[in-house]
Image (spheres, rainbow, N blue to C red):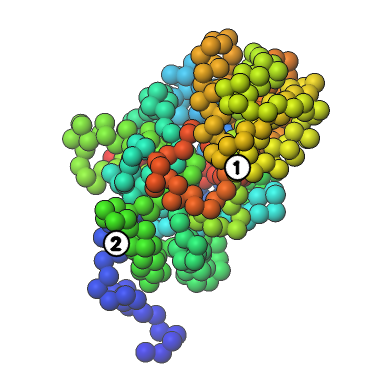
Amino acid sequence: MPQDIARPLFFSYYPNMDINKIFSDCALSIPEILIPKPEFNLKKWAVVACDQYTQDREYWRRVSETAGDGPSALKIILPEVYLEDNGKTERIASIRETMRSYLENDIFAPPVKGFIYLERKTARNRTRKGLVAAVDLDSYDWKPDSTAHIRATEATIPERIPPRMEIRMEAPLESPHIMLLINDPEKTFVEAAGEEAKKENGGNCLYSTELMEDSGEITAWKITEQEHLEKLAAAISALAEKHTAADGSKFIFAVGDGNHSLATAKAVWEEYKKKGAGENHPARYALVEIVNLYDDGLTFEPIHRVLFGTNAETAAAYTAEKLGAEVSPAENFAGAEKTVKAGTPDCPVFGFIQKDGGKIIRVRKAALAPALLQPVLDDFLKENPGVKIDYIHGTEEAERLSCQDGTVSILLPPIAKNNFFSTIAAGGSLPRKSFSMGEADEKRFYIECRKIKE
């Protein structure tokens, strides 16, 4: 057949391949993805994950100002900085009404029936690649001893799920900040998806936009044609086979970001099932971005702790006594950050910093830093009920908060990628808030949406 004659629709690159079954066996589904129409400003639409900048109301005020009166993902999410505010019920009702309005008033272009490949350029001169797809919530389990296809990487706090269920339950739309990791050192899936996407579209992108608050830019290409989807089905099937354990279980995806959001989606789906929802109900699936653990643009950053209502000397002395650690002074934030990063897996280092200095703690034992620190902090909080804690993405925000009176920023070292999947498979999920995929401004931005209510 001449090269310039288009293949018929029934052509199969892999004869007899049932791509839907293959994707289903690997916990994936081909979704219908909604993107705002081209006439709408994507820079105003796209908003960073709701669990970022949880102590920075000024950031979210600027986001609101940038979004303005037009369509924006800001109006269909609830930033966690506002979770404890009065009027949450009214906010959630407004979110659902706005979702319905966007659907009824043709804010979205015709849905993309397929996957979307992304290239996210951050303000830190990194480019992260991703694939937007739907995952089967029946193939996900956040419990620590899970052998499901999709597993949590960090401890899930059941008490954090019900407040989030209030938002998702009965919502007509979802827009995800969930990012799943795939263990693919040969780069056969996400990176290959990029090649297929660019072939399919002749280099023409689906969308491209700058991101607000100097967070870089993002470009996307759709993958909808059978030939390209078949190649991805073959690739994910091979990866699933490669990561099959002796008991037959397959560890295909690990939750990198949005652990509690995915757990919430699972809980909502379980509620729908109790009410008799069919197996093909859209709430059975959740839209996510899949990222390769070995992506050159992906960094694992620590999630720092911030204590409110105490001082560095008290918190550091308590921690050092519990861990049998060495304590030394820290002159300033920058010096403490450098010292913490210079620690080793055999000797994790923590920095307890406030505006007039702080303390350095060295623990001479081989262990993951969050696994050492978090149980001690939990005990400290129980014994000091007036002290509050938050978890901060990014050293800049941790430094800003350390300058406030009665506030201590605790700097943690990063976790290495090596043996990440094998550690989860062998020992279950890590302590909560153990790592972050990049800095706060590198997190996923809400752009894609999907209907989750019939």
> Is residue 321 positioned above or below 272 on the image?
above
- Where residue 329 appears, as percent x and y from the top left, is 77, 26
Q: Is residue 222 visible?
A: no
Residue at 39% from the left image edge and 46% from the top image edge: 426
Residue 207: mark in rendering: none
Q: Is residue 436 left or right of residue 174?
A: right
- Where residue 296 appears, as percent x and y from the top left, is 60, 58
Return the residue nearer the eye: 2 or 438.
438
Q: Is residue 74 left or right of residue 286?
A: right
Q: Is residue 404 left or right of residue 230?
A: right
- Where residue 445 appears, as percent x and y from the top left, is 55, 43
Q: Which mark's residue is nearer the viewer, 2 or 1?
A: 1
Q: Crowding at label 2, few (<14), some or many (≥20) Cα neighbours within 10 Å? A: some
Give the amino acid at mark 1. Asp
> Is residue 80 positioned above or below 311 on the image?
below
Return the residue nearer the eye: 349 or 193.
349
The residue pinned by badge 1 equals 346
The residue pinned by badge 2 equals 22
Residue at 26% from the left image edge and 66% from the top image edge: 18
Query: For the residue labelled by badge 2, is the local secondary structure a helix, a strand or a loop?
Result: helix
Query: For the residue labelled by badge 1, is the local secondary structure a helix, a strand or a loop?
Result: loop
Return the residue nearer the eye: 403 or 6.
403
Q: Is residue 238 visible?
A: yes
Which residue sits furthest left? 276
Q: Quadrant of residue 234?
A: bottom left
- Where residue 346 appears, as percent x and y from the top left, is 60, 42
Give the amino acid at mark 2. Ile
Residue at 31% from the left image edge and 46% from the top image edge: 147
Question: Rounded to the nearest whole Å, what is the CA distance between mark 2 and mark 1?
Answer: 43 Å
Q: Which quadrant of the rendered structure holds the C terminus? A: top left
Residue at 47% from the left image edge and 19% from the top image edge: 88
> Is residue 137 positioned above or below 386 on the image?
below
